[in-house]
Image (cartoon, coloured by chain):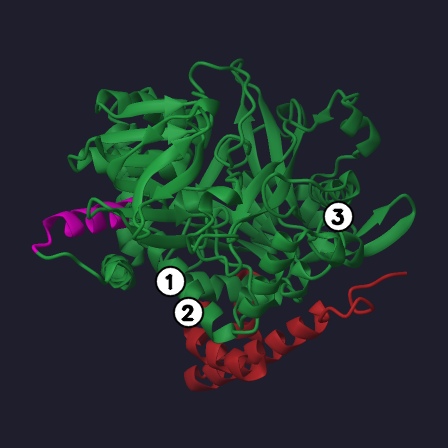
Chain colours: A red, B green
Amino acid sequence: MNTNAAAGAPDRDLTLQVLMIALDKAVAMAAEAQGVSFGELRHQVVYEGTIEATSQIAVIFSDEREKGL
Amino acid sequence: MSQLIVVGSGIAGLIAAYQAAQAGYSVEVLSKSPDPRRLTPAKFESSTYDGFINRYLTATEGHDYLEKKGYVTAMYPGIAEDFQRDLTKGGWLAQPMDAWDSEAQSWLSARSRANQNPAASEALFQEYLDENRMSMTLWYDFFCQQVQDPTLAGRFSLHQLGIDRFYDHPTLFAQALIAQQQCEVVKASYGCEALRSDADFGIYHAGLNHDNPFIQGGGLTIYGLAFDVKAFCLWLLDKLESLNVTLKLGAEFAITAIERDDAGKVIELLSAGGQRYSAHHYLMHPGAFCPNAVLTGTKADNQLAGVKGLWLRIKNAQELWGEPPRPNKIHGGKNQITMGGIQYPAQIADLNCMPQLLPDGRWDLIVGSGYVFIGSYPFTHSTQADRLALTAFANVVERVYDVEIDLDRVVAGDDDRIDLPSSGCVRSFTPDDRELRVIEPTASNGVLLIEGGGNTGTTTKAFFCAKVATEFLNTIDTSITRRDDLSDCYEQIRSQLRQNAALMKQSHWHQLESRLNNACGFADRPMPSNATSSTL
């Protein structure tokens, strides 16, 4: 069976893992700064897409993504 | 002699002609495309007329597909290699690399070089965002003025309540939300739970709840418009004639060459009908269907290639889903293709989805997708590439809408429920995805400006580019001394006009949308709060 990996293309799952790590780091830093729960903030960002929550982590996430990708 | 000749009657050429005529120029439009008001059906070699129904105007429309650190690369890893491999190997090329002619190979090499400079790609992406936002403001203003005629919003199928975007993965959804928030264009955001419980997204129930759901990320509504580009151009041609713009449309008006004097300055254009046309200025809008020979000798030489997209129509969709959905895009990374029992590597699986309202009030669902690089005009490629892209596309449509598609019957035209409403559409691409902006002096101290060619974002950016062009021509005409720095002058004007994009906050878009709602006679809507909203 042909796969993207076999054809030499970057693995999407790996790219997403890097992004997820950057996102989690940004959420952790924002949660600590605000004194809120990591799990709750992460759920708001990733599964609810809460605009306010994503605004809080936006800059940190961009920086972390730069480092990771 | 006209003051200005515009070459091309696609959306970009017509808006350039409109802006120039409004600014007081005497304008003549030359185009190889027939007059769409007089010929139906007609075969058009134009990306304005070969696509289907709606065009979207949003901040991120038509952005480049190049390697960079933004969400495009994360969504579609290996985007650079897509222009190095054919579809059977997971790329976009309709045939293997070594099967292309020297022109296409040269274009592909230039594309490969562009992909080796991610920093330039990042800057280009930001430029797109800024210019698209400036252009959207001009579009809103234009529609606010014009839809005072109460029939026009319906005639254009104008959708002014924002464009929905769905994402197949939660991380990409979060990243896209962050990126678009930074542009201040997000109206509302929905996690998958919110999407599942929102009646407005009932048509996506299967895509959200399937055993292997396609939409696992979430959705955004961003400020933007959608409209029927063909109906709009029909109206705009009448408008141009009322502004005394001369329209010369048809095969005999196809431009075949740019003539120059001994000093290399432009003196006239030659047409297929053997006529010579001269003007003080020339604005050329070559799309994917421009023969490269016309541009030989300019910096636009061999800069345009075509990527084909495909369309499926689910007929009588209202019988399946009731209310028509809002126009939207579904971003789906890459998905594997299974055809004839063989598995092929993945193809990008984005969908553009829109209802088409029929005269009797029912509606069809039109879905577009597909990425098939077909080289430069005139296009020749194997049908196997189209079939692979169509198969990949149909696989995703089945998962999103829970419909079964028998492609053999659909392609043969034997399916009562689903058909191919057109043979596809061809988007113009440049090697670095940036629109052409080539400037040459004319013998009469005017300029020849070649613009356009920027993927699907040309429609969004049409007003911005037309404004830049008009101000540029006016600057040239009012300069006391001859300007030798034409490209610098053009880029300065362009840069100045995009400077205000950073000032466009969410309230700016809300005000524009409210103005347009009022102009259309629709009730105004409350400003969305910064918190997630699923009720807009």
Q: Secondary structure at mark 3?
A: loop
Density class for disc 2 (Cα within 10 Å; few <14, some 14-19, many ≥20) is few
Which residue bears the numbered disc 3?
Answer: B210
Density class for disc 1 (Cα within 10 Å; few <14, some 14-19, many ≥20) is some
Which residue bears the numbered disc 1?
Answer: B127
Query: Taking B78 as reference, is B38 above or below it?
Result: above
* Label 2 with label 1: CB-CB less than 8 Å: yes
Q: Residue at x 66, y 24 (%)?
A: B315
Q: Nearer the viewer, residue B507 or B264?
A: B264
Magenta region, residue range: B466-480
Label disc, if present, on residue B123 of the rendered structure: 2
Q: Is residue B407 left or right of residue B309?
A: right
The N terminus of chain B: image quadrant = top left
Of tags 1 and 3, which is closer to the observer?
Answer: 1
Position in image of residue B461 (x %, y %):
37, 48
Of labels 1 and 3, earlier in sequence is 1
The residue most toward the front is B262
Q: Nearer the viewer, residue B423 or B473?
A: B473
